[in-house]
Image (cartoon, rainbow, N blue to C red):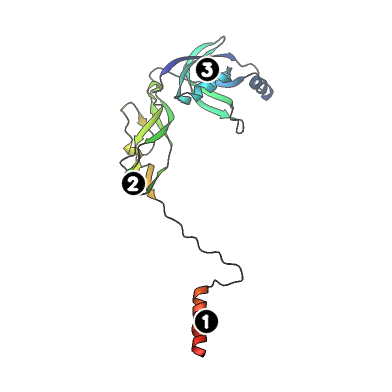
Amino acid sequence: MAEQKNITVRATKREGRGKNDARRARRDGMVPVTVYGGEGGTVAALAPLRDLAAILRSDSGRNTIFSLDIEGIGASEVMFHDRQVHPLRMRLMHADFRRLVAGEKIEVTVTIHLTGEPVGVRDENGHLEQIIREIEIRCDPRDIPDEIIVDVSHLGVHDVLHVSDIPVNEKIEILVSADTVIATVGIVKEEVVAAPVIEGEAPVEPELISKGKKEDEEGGE
């Protein structure tokens, strides 16, 4: 579960809002962030990249609950709501944080982890294909699982695993249709590749032509 890990990230209120200010902040190892929701209004701040990157690398990742302490404003329990990552450097460029409210459920996305070797793969030369790898759920922030683990060892060839097969407790509400396919075991068929035909030439069968020629020659003797 996404437990409170007593993580505190110290931030400063962001004064400048232009692109140049954001670039300077990133050069200094800071990330522009926006905090909203809960009892406070929307606040723009700057937080250390190293602290946010460490949270995203943790087991609970973007679903980690932590305290964001903004100088001059105070601390709030928050979670990642959205983030922008540089497409080439894979560096966090901006983040949106949601303040948590006691008793309020939130919607988040968690990873689906398949475990076990399907019978259809082990004994029937099948291939396991995972169709979806994440799923949306609604629950209390402290009940968010790091991942949802589903056993697929019972699946045979042509068997299908649906969302309805996910074992979850009453604290978690799955927001995806129950008949959505998570994974299936299929058979990999070898594709027959035809011999290439050179343009302008008809395909020939050398052995048959040779045999016919020999028979013609023998018939002419």
- Where is residue 76 drawn, in percent x and y? 48, 14
Residue 73 is left or right of residue 147, and the answer is right
Query: Is residue 42 visible to the viewer in this orientation of the structure?
Result: no
C-beta proximity under 8 Å, tags 1 and 3: no
Q: Is residue 169 above or below residue 198?
A: above
Give the alpha-carbon distance from disc 2 to disc 3, as whole Å.
Answer: 54 Å
Q: Which residue is mark 3?
A: 41
Secondary structure of the residue carrying numbered label 1? helix
- The type of residue carrying mark 3 is Gly
C-beta proximity under 8 Å, tags 1 and 2: no
- The type of residue carrying mark 1 is Lys
Residue at 59% across, 71% down:
201
Q: Which residue is mark 2?
A: 120
Residue at 36% across, 32% down:
149
Q: Which residue is mark 1?
A: 213
- Where is residue 18 drawn, in percent x and y? 67, 23
Q: Tell me the tag on residue 35.
A: none
Secondary structure of the residue carrying numbered label 2? helix
